[in-house]
Image (cartoon, grey):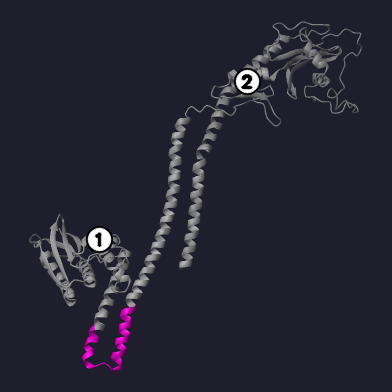
Amino acid sequence: MKKKLTIILTILSLLVISAAAWQAYEAATLEDRLLKIDRQTQANRLLELSLPRVQAEATRLLEAERAKLGNKPPIGLMYYNMPAGGKADFNKGYFMLTSQGVQCPQGDEGLLEWLNRTPIIVDAIRRKAYNSNAPVIDPDKNIEYDPEIHKAVMSVYEVADPNQEIPLKLTGQPGPFFIWFYEGLVVCQRSFPTTHGKGADGFIIDTEAIAKRLLPLVEPGLLAPEIRFIHRGERSNIFPLPMILTPGSEINLPDSGLREDALRGTVASAWLITILSIVILFGLLAFYARLERRRSDFVSAVTHELRTPLTSFNLYTEMLRSGTLPPEKVAEYHETLYNESRRLGHLVENVLAFAKLTRGKVRGRQDVGTCSKLLPELFNKVKERLKKNGIAFHYTLDPRTTLINLRTDLLSVEQILTNLADNAIKYAESEHPEVTIHVLQTHRTLSIRFADNGPGIPAALQKDLFRPFSRSAKSESGRKPGVGLGLALSRDLARSIGGELTLDKSDSQGSTFLLTLPLGE
């Protein structure tokens, strides 16, 4: 049973320590996790507030640049002028592509040179003029032409009149602008029909420059926002630009101080619960160890107390049975056997009474009467016990207590006084041992002072005097009998009937115990 209980306590201890460690970890990381959630929530809220303004401004800027190109591209001219109003700071330059080649307005010669050095972009502009969904890179220019699959998508284009001697003219209205991008390059273009196939015009967007125009519109709570070109797998949130607004790593949390104050109490509570759990665990273990020690002390003490009288019983009964004793010794042996049986009976009575009180069982009987009627008979029983052991006894009653009603359990009071008398008998060392009892009336209580003139109780033993199985060095060495249960039982009995038992004083002149009892109504 002990082994199973040890295993159970070990498992419970590991579980409690594990739970306490997890609780400590949760408490230590709670603030960071909640702060992360707050930052994410605040960032999402600020993004939701910022995006409509950013989107509207991006649309306005693009519309303004598109409007500068008008509805009639200047085709057929060798050189053409910059659109009215010039280009915006985020516009790298305007372009126009027809069967005559790629052109730029006067002043954008640098862009024209760059386009001529980048045929992949020019080829993509030409393909998307016929089909806005055409790929930027021609996957295979040598593929066999299939009009149903590759028409106006790959490197083959419709040409209305292949005769280049016929003047190039516009044959319809330009289509809507659309945006496409390739490796960080953003192109806004539209297509228009001509006598020599589809043409295209538009402008190239500087993403860093337009981001600088849009960033001031972001909520100031985002301390380090970023507007950048989208990465692979990302979706744009600034339509139609292939760009994304991100909150950055720094978010202003205006009520962060309040959050920290609130979290501080929560974290402190979590740590307190963790510490309390560990303290309770070790308290239970200490209690179990103390319980085991008390059980061991009890078994050792009771075994020792039972062995001596049982040895006497065996020896004396054997001698009585053999008939070898002188007749004058028989009475002496009978008296010894009687005294040992009384001592065993008293020991058993104390153990049973202590067990009942430990389980919360009390006698519950009530004796009612005046002090002058109830107490003298009780004190006379104590007197007889002390007298048989050569100890003088006398008692005094305060005259004020003569007519006072007492409502108590006399059996419990008798057992308390008997245990005190037994201790006085056990440790009596003076030439003229004496016990006195003084009965006094105090405020709503009756005080019974039990005093002896023995050697007193050492100061080192007084703090554990009422602890069960606490014994003096003389008792433990076997010089004085006892299991260390009398005073613990006496105090529990006193409390069970509403009173109290304390050590009033103890010195070389003797010891005084104070028993207080509640008065009757």
Above or below, comparing residue 392 to residue 521 in the picture: below
Any mark on residue 111, and which? none
Q: What amino acid type is highlighted by mark number 2? A: Gln
- Which residue sits at x=75%, y=12%? 94
Any mark on residue 55, and which? 2
Label 1: how many residues lie within 10 Å, few (<14), some (14-19) or many (20+)? some
> Is residue 500 something that shows in the picture?
no
Asked which secondary structure carries label 2, the reply is helix
- Between the residue at mark 2 and the residue at mark 1, the CA separation in whole angstroms equals 83 Å
Q: Main secondary structure of the magenta part?
A: helix
Q: What amino acid type is highlighted by mark number 1? A: Arg
> Is residue 349 something that shows in the picture?
yes
Circles 2 and 1: CB atoms closer than 8 Å:
no
Q: Which residues are magenta?
A: 307-335
Above or below, comparing residue 456 to residue 234 in the picture: below
Question: Residue 359 at what x, y percent from top left?
Answer: 33, 64
- Which residue sits at x=18%, y=77%? 388
Left or right, 297 with reference to 438: right
Any mark on residue 495, and which? 1
